[in-house]
Image: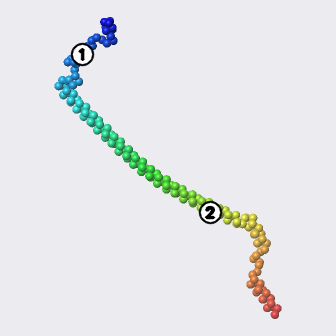
Amino acid sequence: MAEAASQSPFPAQVPIPDIEKRPGFFSRKPENIAQSGIESVAEIANLNRASKSLEDKYSNLRNKVQVMDQNMITSGRKAATEIKVISEQLDEFRRELEDMKEKIRLIIRELKQTAKDEDVKVLQNYVDAWEPMNFVTLNQVEKIVKDILAKRR
């Protein structure tokens, strides 16, 4: 049984380090503590300046974004107003175009009802054949008839 105890998986004696020889977490020398404090204050000041710089940059970027947003809103409103005006003008042009089309259709209908060149030439030939300048008026005929009757009496 003595052999079973000597073949144990655990070592018989574990060496323990000397606690007094090891430096502790807070075991700095007084001069190192003062130097470390000055370095810490300097690091905090640097971090504070960097933080302030980042805050300023962030604030500037936020202001720029607000200005850009305002400009986009203004531009959007202006564009919407211009689109509305253009749309109204386009509607007015469409109405005017329809009015013009209707007037052109009316002119075409009236032109279809007018006499053609051939018709005018035919009428000209009739007028020339009849010689209306040689016609007498009713008053002239009555006067001639009265004159003839007066001579016979």
Q: Residue at x 25, y 31 (%)?
A: 43
Residue occupying the far front of the picture: 1
Quick check: 130 above or below 149?
above
Which sits in the foreground, 148 or 51?
A: 51
The numbered disc on residue 17 is 1
Judged left or right of residue 12, residue 139 is: right
Label 1–label 2 contact, CB within 8 A: no
Q: Secondary structure at mark 2?
A: helix
Q: Residue at x 78, y 89 (%)?
A: 146
Residue 76 is situated, as x and y percent measured from the top left of the image, at: 44, 50
- Residue that label 2 marks: 103
Judged left or right of residue 63, residue 100 is: right
Q: Amino acid at mark 2?
A: Lys
Judged left or right of residue 134, residue 5 is: left
Q: Quadrant of residue 121?
A: bottom right
Q: Residues within 10 Å of mark 2 (few under 14, many from 20)?
A: few
Residue 131 is situated, as x and y percent measured from the top left of the image, at: 77, 74
Q: Amino acid at mark 1?
A: Pro
Q: CA distance from mark 1 to mark 2?
A: 115 Å
Q: Nearer the viewer, mark 1 or mark 2?
A: 1
Q: Residue at x 27, y 36 (%)?
A: 48
Residue 3 is situated, as x and y percent measured from the top left of the image, at: 32, 6
Q: Residues within 10 Å of mark 1 (few under 14, many from 20)?
A: few
Residue 116 is situated, as x and y percent measured from the top left of the image, at: 72, 64
Q: Secondary structure at mark 1?
A: loop
**Image quadrant where one finds the N terminus:** top left
**Total count of labels:** 2
Does label 1 or label 2 sit earlier along the sequence? 1
**Image quadrant where one finds the C terminus:** bottom right
Quick check: 44 above or below 19?
below
